[in-house]
């Protein structure tokens, strides 16, 4: 088993490492040569010096897995790969692309006989050790080829699924992230209210740890929040600034296009916009949560 990984940042690098630890050969390329060298030295990855070099080092049916930023970078990389690949080869976009772009790219690649899988990828920086959640969109024949790789990347055989046609993988991940916004916002606001009841002098580290055991709000986000609060409840060094990755916006746009009410998801997105001008404890908590599960930078005050 062998594939190429293009984009070896926080997600791509860890995914390459997990595949290698499951005895799958990985040819890796990134413009940051430090990322490449680190994986070669520590995990035994096969280095490539260019995208063309990546393709040349693959076997008969070439599988190119991309973990790149959404937008022009992903678009241009796919266009550059087309003349290098043959019919039956497969491109996987594991980044957070807009599902409408994935539908168009899938149709474009189909004209060349190249398979395309849009893969919604969840798990953040913890995926290397805990496994990822993968949502495959595309033709079943290509999803079947990728099944053994999914088994290596996930913790159990229930950690991945072929969810539907091209576009459905990124659509599913988009809604996943929209829901995530709402869950994070609810936790942050509730804890802000607990902190604000000064007459009780509540210990938020104690309470969040308590909720982890048997309560109906227990979750991985709560686990991460509890761990963060054990270290520091004041959050004085954290700026109340929370970025949004784009998928929250696309989720709200989708709700408008479908005419479906999504007030919680919409307000959660608006709260992130407002955080740039606010000085609230809840925004600091949201920033810490994003750092805990995704490795996103925390802006210091």
Image (tube, grey):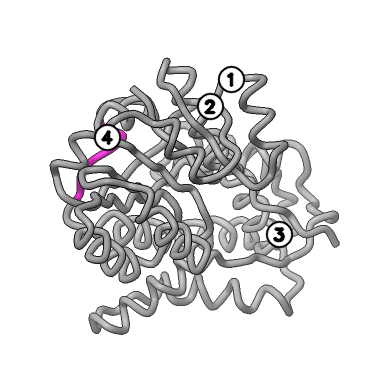
- Which image quadrant is residue 34 in? top right
Q: Which residue is mark 2?
A: 17
Q: Which residue is mark 3?
A: 284
Q: Is residue 205 left or right of residue 143?
A: right
Prevailing SS of the magenta stretch: strand
Q: Are marks 2 and 3 in contact (CB under 8 Å)?
A: no
| Distance between the alpha carbons at the discs numbered 2 and 3 | 32 Å
Q: Are marks 1 and 4 in contact (CB under 8 Å)?
A: no
Mark 3 secondary-structure assignment: helix
Question: In front here: 132 or 280?
Answer: 132
Give the number of the disc on residue 61: 4
Q: Earlier in the sequence, mark 2 or mark 3?
A: 2
Q: Which residues are magenta?
A: 158-163
Q: Are marks 2 and 1 in contact (CB under 8 Å)?
A: yes
Q: Which residue occupies 40% across, 46% down?
A: 121
| Distance between the alpha carbons at the discs numbered 2 and 1 | 6 Å
Q: Is residue 176 left or right of residue 145?
A: right
Q: Which residue occupies 61% across, 50% down?
A: 289
- Residue 7, image x and y in percent? 55, 45
Q: Earlier in the sequence, mark 4 or mark 2?
A: 2
Q: Are marks 4 and 2 in contact (CB under 8 Å)?
A: no
């Amino acid at each position: 088993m062998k594939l190429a990984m293009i984009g070896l940042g926080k997600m791509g690098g860890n995914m390459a490492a997990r595949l290698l630890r499951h005895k799958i050969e990985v040819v890796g390329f990134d413009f940051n040569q430090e990322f490449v060298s680190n994986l070669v030295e520590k995990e035994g990855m096969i280095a490539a010096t260019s995208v063309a070099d990546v393709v040349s080092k693959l076997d008969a049916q070439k599988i190119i897995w991309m973990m790149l930023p959404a937008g022009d970078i992903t678009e241009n990389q796919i266009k550059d790969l087309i003349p290098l690949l043959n019919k039956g080869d497969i491109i996987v976009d594991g980044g957070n692309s807009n599902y409408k772009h994935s539908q168009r790219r899938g149709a474009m690649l189909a004209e060349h006989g190249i398979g395309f899988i849009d893969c919604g990828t969840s798990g953040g920086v913890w995926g290397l050790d805990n496994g990822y959640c993968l949502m495959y969109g595309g033709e079943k024949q290509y999803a079947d080829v990728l099944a053994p790789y999914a088994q290596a990347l996930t913790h159990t055989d229930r950690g991945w699924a072929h969810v539907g046609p091209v576009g459905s993988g990124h659509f599913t991940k988009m809604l996943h992230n929209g829901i995530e916004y709402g869950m994070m916002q609810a936790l942050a606001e509730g804890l802000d209210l607990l902190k604000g009841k000064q007459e009780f002098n509540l210990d938020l580290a104690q309470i969040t740890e308590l909720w982890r055991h048997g309560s109906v709000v227990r979750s991985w986000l709560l686990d991460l929040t509890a761990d963060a609060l054990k270290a520091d409840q004041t959050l004085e060094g954290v700026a109340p600034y929370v970025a949004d990755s784009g998928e929250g916006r696309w989720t709200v746009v989708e709700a408008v296009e479908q005419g479906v009410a999504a007030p919680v998801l919409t307000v959660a997105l608006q709260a992130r916009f407002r955080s740039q001008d606010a000085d609230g404890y809840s925004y600091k908590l949201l920033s810490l949560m994003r750092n805990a599960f995704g490795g996103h930078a925390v802006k210091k005050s």
